[in-house]
Image (cartoon, helix red, strand yellow):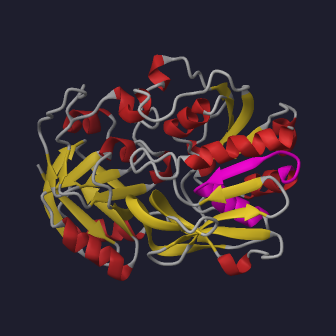
Amino acid sequence: MQAILALEDGRIFRGQGHGHPGECRGEVVFNTSLTGYQEIATDPSYAGQIVVLTNPQIGNYGTNHADNEAAKPYIEGLIVREFSAISSNWRSEQVTDEYMERYSVPVLAEIDTRALVRHLRTKGVMRGVISTATSDIDALVEKARNVRKMDGTDLAKVVSTRTSYDFDASDPRNQAGDPLLADGFLHKPHSDRKILNVVAYDFGIKQNILRMLARENCRVKVVPAETTADQVLALKPDGVFLSNGPGDPEPVDYAVRAIRQMIGRVPIFGICLGHQLTGLALGGRTYKLKFGHHGGNHPVRNNLTGKVEITAHNHNFAVDPDSINANEVELTHVDLNDQTLEGLRHKSLPLFSVQYHPEAAPGPHDSHYLFRDFRKMMEEWKG
């Protein structure tokens, strides 16, 4: 079937439709990861967005339950160069076309994704519409211009869990993810270490974050985004984790208030949206990037060690480093592509955060050490 992408500036791309027929709307962003299309599709941080994948061949290894980062895809739509109608992998349980149709995700293929990505890099992120239902270009462009902007939009409470739950690390369904980790090629939980209790805020949390915390011998309770500081502290956690998530951090003022009330009372580790909310809680400001960071190949320098980590990113907003009080907070990581702030640590209180995704899924393993750092911070605070 024929499909059309219409952008808010009037640019049109025509191609073939796959997955779910019909129409979808969202902010159009591009991701430079070479693999992991299923993990990308099921990352709640992509709520409200149509994702363009720069790797030209997508769908060829199929889909499986183990690679889900959430119970369902959160992307509004998917745009690719070539979309495979078959899968060839021993782990595949369902071809990608059927998977996308099952979860009502439209797919646009057979377009020049290089041209689209160059357009987004030049003009910036744009709102768009994918449609297989109409060829009325003027109507589609008008719909694109009426898509809700991410600026000022709180999506954290939309994708968050409605009730608290305990992450069951013994459930085989929760032991999947990165095959290297699942097979113990890297590190497994240390049975001789004491179990620590972590409360994890769900602003759009990924499964691999929970697995990584569990591998550090953490018992994790996941709580809704709007949980108050008093409710969290009443659980007497050894540490609090602030998750990734979609949308603009500034409207998530309830979380900023909670974080501000918990600083200095319990160790805190935040990533992605959790990092941005931490920056706001410390008195900083955030701003929207021109086309965001999305992909598994971003070089980040650790200012504490001088080492460069190749990292996984998925964010449209960033913390303004000039807005952070340098007397209280150390800027620990910086992106070498555009010098954006990628990490901070309080100089006297147990608090640190990073903008990128140390759990990857998909992506490199360079930053897994941050989960060990979190455990060490909790042990030192508890001791």
Seen as rendered, the residue at the extreme top is 171
Residue at 39 percent across and 46 percent down: it is 362
The vertical placement of 373 against 220, above or below, is below
Is residue 214 in view from this perspective?
yes
Give the quadrant of residue 167. Answer: top right
In the rendered image, residue 270 lying in the magenta stretch gets the answer yes
Q: Where is residue 195 drawn, in percent x and y?
A: 72, 26
Give the quadrant of residue 103. Answer: top left
In the rendered image, residue 156 lying in the magenta stretch gets the answer no
Residue at 75 percent across and 46 percent down: it is 377
Residue at 36 percent across and 57 percent down: it is 50
The vertical placement of 268 against 13, above or below, is above
376 left or right of 247 in image: right
The vertical placement of 146 against 62, above or below, is below
161 left or right of 109 in image: right
Q: Where is residue 152 drawn, in percent x and y?
A: 61, 66
Q: Nearer the viewer, residue 71 or 302?
A: 302
Residue at 16 percent across and 55 percent down: it is 109
Q: How many marks?
A: 0
Q: Nearer the viewer, residue 93 or 342?
A: 342
Q: Nearer the viewer, residue 228 or 335?
A: 335
The vertical placement of 42 against 142, above or below, is above
Q: Quadrant of the C terminus?
A: top right
Q: Nearer the viewer, residue 363 or 244?
A: 363
Q: Magenta region: which residues? A: 262-281
Q: Where is residue 196 drawn, in percent x and y?
A: 74, 30
Is residue 202 in view from this perspective?
no
Q: Where is residue 187 drawn, in percent x and y?
A: 51, 33
